[in-house]
Amino acid sequence: MRFVLNRLEDISAALVTAGVGLFVILEAGSYRMGSLTSMGPGYFPTILGWTMIVLAALMLVAMRPSESLRLPGGHQFRGMLCIAAAFGSFALTIERFGMLPSITLAVFLASLANDRTKPWVGLLLGLGTALVCALIFRVGLGLQIEVF
Amino acid sequence: MDALLSNLALGLTVALSWNGLFYCFLGVFLGTLVGVLPGIGIMATLAMLMPITFHLEPTLALIMLSGIYYGASYGGSTASILMNLPGTATSAVTGLDGYPMAQQGRAGQALFMTAIASFVGSLFGVILLAGFSVPLSRVALRFGPHEYVALMLLGLIAASVIGSGRSLRSLISVSLGLALGLIGLDLNSGVPRFTFGQTVLFDGLPLVAVAIGLFGLPEIIASSGSKTVPRVQEGKIRLRDMLPTREDWKRSAMPMVRGSGIGGFFGALPGTGGLVATFVSYAVERRVSKHPEEFGKGAIEGVAAPEAANNSAVQSAFIPTLSLGIPGDPVMAIMLGVMMVHGIIPGPTVIQDRPDLFWGLIVSFIIGNLMLLVLNLPLVGMWVKILKIPYNLLFPVIVAFTCIGIYSVNYQIVDIFVLLGFGFLGLGMRALKFEVAPLLLGFVLGPMIEEYFRRALIVSRGDIGSFFDRPIAGTILAITFAILVWAIGSKLFAAFRARGRREVQTDG
């Protein structure tokens, strides 16, 4: 068991690679293969899938023990969550509500990733950024994004 | 000679037009601005600013995008000299001696010499680019699909294997990129592949969202929680106090020349580029120096040589991209992607068919570097002030600009989710110690490789051996296989030796 745990990083990487390779081969199987002279849409993906499986196998052969898998720490996790929320909120609100509310919300959510930023500072920053963005992109460059 | 002069004149008319000058300036300005910020590398800078260029005509777009690229490589050294926080691996080398110089109160001289060395290196690179691209493209015009497949394979494999300690992981990264490049309609048959019925995917994944996701998002997330207040080793940074001494000049002259040469050579090779060039030139200077003990403690040669090498490589990296249409590194892959978005098929024909684009670009490089000299010498104080903006207020604004940038490319919300997906893919790959740069290279080159591969086999009636019958393609493939065998072989060998040693230890 310790043998596996020590090499968890390499083993998981190889397994993921082999999995993707296998998926590519299976999916490519549903396309026409063709022959070497006139390749169908399935030919190249199949070669690629097998290449990935071979690479995964080589990786298992060459694997070495490494320090334990580093999982993201607390503040890293907070950063991921807030930044993802920021982009997600932009995507969900931009077409319905326009630039001002959408950017304000996105900047506010992103600013929460850092616990040194107080929420009201983030909100002000968001409003300011939204105004500047509206001026640059809508008024200045004339992009087809509604302001609100 | 006449041809060269008339070409340069053509380039001047393009680059000296109001638009040409404006977008060149905008590019180098924005490039320096974002390059100066610590924690944001060149790839992230380029990816984040790329959407702006999509609304321009192709020549201006490339002028601006290249400006961002070499502007960022000027700016990258500022943070590493003043704060020991390099934005890129290449500027880390500059920091080795630049930061000690700043600690000794010689920050001004280090910054001054960096700007001069960058300028000298860039100029050398541009001369190489102007001199070699045309003859190379003439040779390349006679290339068939076999040669292209071979060259692209060489580019992919060299880029992922050379200079990375984990060649197997890089190869996996490349193949993942190739697989992602498959998504979309098959060029030959029109069959949708790996789209799972989603019509949005028929055009393939959006390059901008993929690039920003892979490079920008992990950097934003990694530094979003940063609690440190920027501390800048300022010293005196007024132009008058920055002037290097006569001794500094004397010690930097030859390193700059050597650095430019080394950079120009490695930059043009597929897969090596600026990083290898800076390391090699630093090592060379330490070896030839009369006082090697000063290196790492503020030797000015250690600033001048790598900086010249880096910028020379940045410019000469355009040689294979513009003359063959084959990018040597991920940055060039992005350039290539932008050309394709604008409907220009990169390759030897571009130089013949669009001399205004090629020569306009070359002249704009020279002008852009002159602008950078101004931006980085008299105006360096401005960048130092920017370094003091607290990062926790800066990155939310970057997030906002990124959002708008991506959305404005296609006006598709899906692109934002693609960005998020690739952001987390990038984070996951980093956690498992995969590099993401080879993935992007595979993603851009994948469709082209498949296309040429299929065409080559149609031409030679399905004979795989035909690749080795042709002298140029055969030679390139032989080199590629040699690199591959060496990379994988050395990994396997190391693994077996380590295993053998451990068994001996447990026995005893």
Image: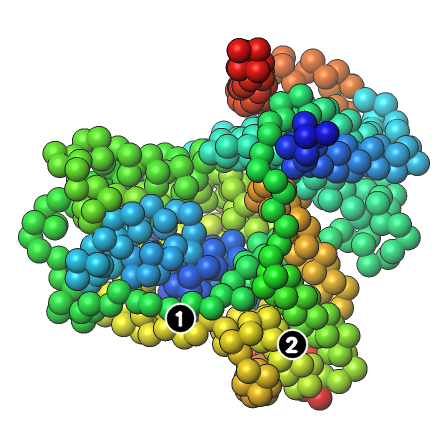
Q: Residue at position x 30%, y 67% from top?
A: B232
In percent of width and height, residue B121 lies at: 29, 47
Relative image position of residue B451 (x, y in whole percent): 72, 35
Asked if residue A142 shows in the view, the reply is no
- Tell me the amino acid under the disc marked 2: Leu
Report whether mark 1 lies on the same chain as mark 2. no
**Residue B444, image x, y percentages:** 64, 44
The foreground one among B469 and B281 is B281
* Residue B359, position as x, y percentages in the image: 42, 51
Q: Specify the farthest residue to the front.
A: B508
Residue sitting nearer the eye, B260 or A9: A9
Query: Measuring 27% from the left and 72% from the top, which residue is drawn there?
Result: B381
Chain on which label 2 sits = A
- In the image, is A61 to the left or to the right of B26? right
Q: Is residue A133 above or below residue B319?
A: below
* Residue B132 marker: none
Nearest the eye: B476 or B322:
B476
Q: Report the residue marked by disc 2.
A: A109
State how far apart marks 1 and 2 are (Cα): 21 Å
What's the chain of the residue with tag 1?
B
* Numbered marks: total: 2
For this orientation, the residue located farthest to the left is B246
As drawn, is B353 to the left or to the right of A25?
left
* Up/down of B303 relative to A96, above or below: above
Circle 1 or circle 2, nearest the eye: 1
Residues packed near mark 2 inside 10 Å, few (<14), some (14 to 19) or many (20 plus): many
* Label placed on residue B229: 1
- Look at 65% across and 37% down and name the residue there: A9
The disc labelled 1 sits on which kind of residue?
Val
